[in-house]
């Protein structure tokens, strides 16, 4: 059983809509003003608020949301009350004007880079301005074209309860304005802003319940602690910092000390959550006294502090241990996981937490989807922070490898792969990171059962193979590519295989194995990758020939004579070349045909099968194209017919085909029944072994019509006709008419 619950039906539907928006919607142009907008093709479509909001959020999360797509969300077909936009930095007022027609009570629009907060508020209708309860504009901009931080529009939100302006240019002047004008404000986040003076908060002392001032480094007045102590209704207080910035701060004699706050045991009577992560000068006796005097405390942030290791927070048998107090830190697993849960936007905290988590992930014996879910957000939020990507990819490998991966829902394995590939893209030259990603991807469970962009993965893995000459990495790379090359489209295999650097690297690996006495797994994987990359890809076959691949493969056949695993893969690739009419002359080489003739009579049917396929394709061009006189065409054809006639059907499938198109020219080769014989035998083989896949394919591609014509032709041999009739019977049995 998978350690997870499936998506809800609504989630599946919304995901489908977001991925197929152009199929479900159309663009209409207004002839009066030439403006265009998206509309649902089904004219009676209406999405209730929950569905509308989830669709908007899904489009945003996947990076699909644009000004144009926002036009879909008009009030006559959607309802928006809670708007969350966090991953669409390029949208502007052009798209956001659609919000004016909605009654919005909660607006989160973070990371907007092309619109100021004032302009964002200008996109709201009068009802929303009067009733908005929550506004989150973290990581957005207040600065106008005149380079002045303008916050005056915030004053319009008279009923605002929650305001988040973290990581913006918001300053002390802005704080004066909002504390004066927003009379109902209860929750405020001014983390990492330019606020230098928090004394305006005194105006909110009788109503402020939550205050976050993480990394508020410019505060240097002596009133900080006294102001905080006046906030009698405060439940949540965050004064944490990134410890890396502490060295210079501690030299500032005017910098307030958290120990001074902890000394005030009688202030903040209702406090239940206090975050002092990263702070220096935390004395355990003062912290203990503060906690004992505040029995309502349920959370304490201690990331990047030494006090998190105190037995009061780590040992349940300790006299002062409080089971109801949740702590973040690095002293034990629960502290680390809580840190990942609470701080996905803080890169330094995520980095440190993942570093400490790694040792725990090495010891898990049961699947921990809960831990995976905590790692992914931080990894997604900080794709360009190398330390996070290094630690995250290492942890995710431990969490998804072997038997653990078998029990994890494919949904989460898919998210692991997507973020792993992003890490590969962002750090193509970092060897250890690339190795981490390959370790995760080199999993049968992931490669066979999980849905992800397989072409993107194969391309990145091939680029890694070219970039590094590390035996273990190379082994994983070719293993991954050998599997994925069979799972991507022919157009995609052509893009990969036809790239000279990729082909050169794979051929060099084969060449390097020529001096070894035995065929190892690396050689087998590389041959499989080349075989799959050339499948129905003329451009890849051409690159292979241009790079003297046939000469190398001829040496391989001679070196490893009788080793059917090698011979099958080599002949399988050459068979792909033989399917390309304009490349067949490159195979008309005396040395190769002599070896091919021997392999035609191999006791291994799979080797004989592919050798016969090559002979059939070469002979199908007629006598004039057969230019190797030392190996006569008539002799090869006779031997081809004799060999195929004596084959016994193997128990399982020998080969997988993308289509039957390469066989069709062979079926019409009336002058050489041996060519037809191999073709019908091959088609019968796959249709009888896997009718569910191949019968529909044969019917759709017109193969059954060709077989029927073959049966009607007076010159068709009896043996060929018998097999052709057997194929049609299988198709009729598995594809009933009507």
Image (tube, helix red, strand yellow):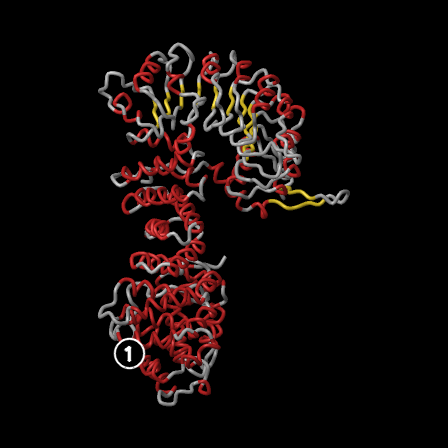
| Residue under the point 47% across and 68% down | 703
Which x, y percent locates residue 448?
36, 52
Q: Nearer the viewer, residue 618 or 671?
A: 618
Question: Is residue 373 among what the camera can see?
Answer: no
Q: Is residue 314 left or right of residue 480?
A: left
| Residue under the point 61% across and 44% down | 25
Q: Nearer the viewer, residue 25 or 387?
A: 387
In which image quadrant can residue 312 be found? top left
Which x, y percent locates residue 696?
45, 60
Q: Nearer the viewer, residue 665 or 725?
A: 665
Which x, y percent locates residue 737?
48, 59
Q: Is residue 654 left or right of residue 318?
A: right
In which image quadrant can residue 38 be found? top right
Which x, y percent locates residue 719?
37, 77
Residue 412, compared with residue 278, is above or below; it is: below
Task: Tell me the SS state at disc 1.
Answer: loop
Residue 298, compared with residue 598, is above or below; it is: above
Count of marks placed on residues: 1
Question: Is residue 637 among what the camera can see?
Answer: yes
Location of the N terminus (image quadrant): top left
Instruction: Looking at this view, name the residue that lies furthest to the right.
Output: 32
Can you identify the residue that label 1 sits on?
601
Q: Residues within 10 Å of mark 1 (few under 14, many from 20)?
A: some
Instruction: Looking at this view, name the residue that lies furthest to the top.
Output: 266
Q: Nearer the viewer, residue 626 or 141?
A: 141
């Amino acid at each position: 059983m998978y350690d997870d619950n499936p998506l809800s039906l609504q989630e599946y539907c919304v995901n489908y809509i977001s991925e197929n928006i152009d199929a479900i919607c159309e663009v209409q142009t207004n002839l009066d003003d030439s403006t265009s907008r998206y509309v649902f093709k089904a004219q009676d479509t209406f999405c209730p608020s929950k569905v509308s909001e989830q669709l908007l959020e899904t489009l945003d999360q996947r990076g699909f949301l644009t000004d144009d797509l926002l036009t879909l969300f008009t009030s006559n077909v959607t309802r928006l009350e809670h708007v969350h936009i966090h991953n669409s930095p390029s949208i502007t007022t052009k798209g956001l004007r659609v919000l004016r027609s909605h009654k919005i009570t909660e607006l989160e629009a973070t990371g907007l880079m092309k619109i100021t907060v004032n302009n964002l508020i200008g996109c709201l209708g009068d009802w929303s301005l009067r009733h908005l309860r929550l506004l989150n504009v973290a990581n957005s901009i207040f600065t106008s074209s005149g380079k002045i931080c303008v916050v005056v529009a915030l004053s319009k939100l008279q009923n605002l309860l929650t305001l988040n302006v973290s990581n913006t240019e918001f300053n002390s002047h802005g704080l004066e304005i909002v504390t004066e004008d927003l009379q109902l404000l209860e929750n405020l986040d001014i983390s990492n802003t330019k606020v230098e003076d928090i004394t305006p908060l005194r105006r909110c002392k009788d109503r402020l319940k939550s205050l976050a001032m993480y990394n508020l480094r410019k505060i240097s007045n002596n009133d900080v602690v006294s102001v905080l102590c006046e906030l009698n209704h405060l439940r949540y207080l965050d004064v944490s910092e990134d410890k890396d910035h502490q060295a210079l701060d501690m030299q500032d004699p005017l910098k307030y000390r958290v120990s001074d706050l902890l000394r005030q045991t009688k202030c903040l009577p209702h406090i239940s959550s206090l975050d002092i992560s990263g702070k220096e000068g935390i004395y355990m006796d003062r912290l203990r006294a503060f906690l004992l005097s505040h029995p309502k405390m349920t959370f304490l942030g201690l990331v990047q502090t030494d006090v998190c290791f105190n037995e009061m927070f780590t040992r349940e048998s300790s006299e002062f241990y409080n089971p109801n107090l949740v702590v973040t830190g690095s002293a034990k697993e629960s502290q680390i996981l809580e840190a990942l849960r609470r701080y996905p936007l803080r890169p330094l905290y995520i980095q440190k937490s993942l570093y400490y988590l790694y040792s725990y992930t090495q010891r898990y014996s049961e699947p921990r989807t809960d831990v995976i879910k905590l790692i992914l957000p931080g990894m997604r939020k900080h794709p360009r922070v190398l330390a996070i990507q290094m630690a995250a990819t290492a942890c995710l490998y431990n969490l998804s490898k072997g038997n653990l991966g078998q029990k994890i829902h494919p949904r989460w394995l898919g998210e692991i792969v997507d973020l792993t590939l992003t890490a590969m893209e962002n750090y193509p030259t970092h060897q250890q990171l690339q190795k981490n990603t390959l370790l995760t991807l080199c999993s049968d469970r992931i490669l066979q059962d999980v849905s992800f962009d397989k072409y993107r993965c194969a391309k990145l893995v091939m680029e890694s193979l070219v970039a590094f000459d590390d035996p273990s990495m190379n082994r994983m790379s070719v293993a991954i590519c050998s599997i994925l090359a069979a799972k991507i489209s022919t157009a995609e295999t052509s893009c990969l295989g036809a790239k000279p650097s990729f082909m050169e690297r794979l051929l060099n690996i084969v060449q390097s194995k020529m001096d070894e006495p035995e065929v190892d797994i690396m050689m087998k994987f590389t041959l499989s990758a080349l075989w799959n990359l050339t499948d129905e890809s003329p451009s890849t076959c051409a690159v292979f020939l241009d790079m003297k691949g046939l000469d190398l493969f001829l040496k391989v056949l001679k070196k490893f004579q009788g080793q059917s695993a090698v011979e099958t893969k080599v002949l399988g690739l050459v068979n792909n070349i033989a399917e390309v009419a304009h490349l067949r002359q490159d195979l008309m080489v005396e040395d190769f045909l002599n070896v091919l003739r021997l392999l035609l009579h191999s006791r291994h049917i799979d080797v004989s099968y592919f050798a016969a396929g090559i002979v059939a394709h070469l002979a199908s061009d007629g006598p004039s194209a057969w230019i190797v006189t030392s190996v006569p065409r008539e002799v090869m054809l006779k031997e081809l017919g004799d060999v195929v006639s004596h084959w016994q059907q193997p128990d399982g499938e020998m080969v997988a085909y993308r289509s039957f198109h390469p066989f069709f020219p062979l079926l019409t080769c009336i002058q050489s029944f041996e060519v037809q014989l191999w073709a019908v035998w091959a088609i019968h083989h796959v249709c009888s072994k896997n009718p569910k896949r191949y019968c529909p394919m044969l019917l759709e591609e017109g193969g059954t019509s060709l077989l029927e014509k073959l049966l009607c032709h007076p010159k068709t041999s009896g043996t060929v006709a018998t097999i052709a009739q057997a194929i049609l019977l299988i198709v009729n049995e598995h594809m009933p008419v009507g």
